[in-house]
Amino acid sequence: MKTDNREILLSVRDLKKHFPITQGIIISKTIGAVHAVDGVSFDIHRGETLGLVGESGCGKSTTGRTILQLYRPTAGSVWYQGKDLAKLKSEELRAMRRQMQMIFQDPYASLNPRMTVGEIIGEPLVIHKLADKKQTQERVEHLLDLVGLNSRFANRFPHEFSGGQRQRIGVARALALQPELIVCDEPISALDVSIQAQVVNLLEDLQKEFGLTYLFIAHDLSMVRHISDRIAVMYLGIIVELTTRDELYENPLHPYTQALLSAVPIPDPVVEEKRQRIVLEGDVPSPVNPPSGCRFRTRCPLAIDICSVEKPEFREVKPDHFVACHVVN
Amino acid sequence: MAELLKVQDLETQFRVREGIVHAVNGVSFSLKEGETLGIVGESGCGKSVTVMSMLRLIPSPPGKVVAGQAFYQGKDLLKMSDEEIRHVRGSQISMVFQDPMTSFNPVLTIGRQVAEPLEIHQGMSRKQAYERVADMLELVGIPKAKARLNDYPHQFSGGMRQRVMIAMSLVCNPSVLIADEPTTALDVTIQAQIVELVKELRDKLGMAIIWITHDLGVIAGLADRMAVMYGGYIIETAPVKSLYANPTHPYTLGLLNSLPRLDTDQYRRLESIDGLPPILMDKPTSCPFAPRCTFVREHCLQENPPLLETGPDHYAACWVDTKTGRERA
């Protein structure tokens, strides 16, 4: 799984996405903004899996969607093949989207119930005018086969499938255009435990076969560790720590990462008995009025005076290990 | 320790348009004073229906408890009059539900709702009850509890709401607390807070707990005894350490192997359990797990195995010894 090949596929620089809060029906005016993503920067290398973790509302899904320009960013840039996606016109963007696809969280909401599985998987080919009817049909059968579904299922409707099978259909649709990058937005959190492993194994097999690059968004830290090469931890709209998988789990530097890791239960009563937990106080603050200075300072056990005044810089403290914290040396 | 609760051969069915769903097919377990029992299983395995049947909370029609007994302190809950069971529910056996968003009445204040069991079961006046409620909210870690009695549920965050729910369930000092996936809707750091809180309260108040979950991690550090359910049956039950150290049923084994673990370094491919959970339209005559089992034998298809003792206080419903791969004598 390790990538020595460090070619950068995609660069995100200071990306921001704010959603306006409006008041009034006829004369609507903006009275504030949800700072969902508030300045994130990272690179994705070709062929790697970058895990993006954080709790609900931290902006991880918004980041994924903004990269693909499903939301147009408020500020910042997304560089892909020498072009800034944030500045592309819709025509050019559509052509670029061929190389970037998405797998969604909810396999029940992301498939059109009135279309057959064949139509769903074949639709990208039709939209991009890449295949005639017969070719599309062949390609659909091949894709179904690839994701472990019977190719005769092409004429069935989504409701005839279970959650895990639907997620396979979602994977097949994402693969239809032979993309380079797939953004996986919590692809397994709606599935049962025994089915999760099936889908993760499928994603790993496909990555090996086609050299795919994944941005894997999730809140389950054990699963992210399993699948990722590098991991970024988000908190309230910013990335607080970004490093390789092993470094993050062996040597987490940011106090939030440390707390997050210690909160993950381990399926072993003997280990659990001996574990010391860092239990964070309170809840995540609202992204409408994020705390001044460091976003995490209101719950941070290590906070000092400077944390409320100055935003910590996201800096490389050792090779390949970035962290945004005043306390870390 | 005295036996508090004893459930025997409980069977529950639901009548639907397509026929009869056999949700629970003869479940037996017991609970001692102060003991914590974890019931684990995937969606649709019958874990919630089991406890709901016991407390007579199954809506009828379509549901019906068709057989079995559930003794609480020597009296059968299933044969009690409505008056008697109402007295047991809420004051002696109480329940915490999964979703803290939908299990409160949004138009009544928190104080009113938490005080209700005290007014009903213990005949307290509103004033007395409110004092006790304030103490209870303090105990579960609501800051400035007294000032928040007149707040409405939407003014609390998810984690805080789950704390209020726990306060409500414990306000009458029950001897059994049933928690039905109480942390599933919460983030990991909040989940850790709630688990720590329940452990603390258990030490202080000494109630017995039935904790229902699909997460083998959360329960590992909490339970004394475990029961794993599949297809409406308990397929393995054992003391918690014995279950994790020696998982005996192929399904338990499969579940544990399909989880990535945060505390092991080397990468391994996840073992998935192929196939899908059973649809319980017919009462199984063979082992319900047989179609997905890698150890399957002729015998498994002919006869459904009962729980067999496979070790000290360790029972599994399987004809095959998963260690040797041979059929049990």
Image (spheres, coloured by chain):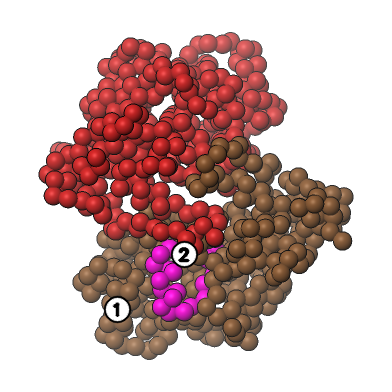
Chain colours: A red, B brown
Q: Nearer the viewer, residue A144 or B195?
A: B195
Residue under numbered circle 1: B135
Estimate the x, y position of residue B212 in percent, counting from the top left. 54, 63
Residue for point 41% across, 53% down = A263
The image quadrant that residue A58 belongs to is top left
Residue tagged by mark 2?
B97
**Image-quadrant location for residue B85:** bottom right
**Residue at horizontal 66 percent and vertical 48 percent from the top:** B254
Q: Is residue B211 magenta?
A: yes
Query: Where A288 falls versus A91 (above or below)?
Result: below
* Within-10-Å neighbours for mark 2: few <14, some 14–19, many 20+: many
Residue B294 lies, with reference to residue B12, above or below; the image says above
Image vertical order of residue A36 relative to residue A283, above or below: above
Question: The disc numbered 2 marks a residue on which chain?
Answer: B
Q: Residue at x 66, y 21 (%)?
A: A141
Q: Secondary structure at mark 2?
A: loop
Question: Any magenta on residue B118?
Answer: no
- Which region is colored magenta? B195-212
Q: Residue at x 41, y 37 (%)?
A: A247
Q: Quadrant of the N terminus of chain B?
A: bottom right
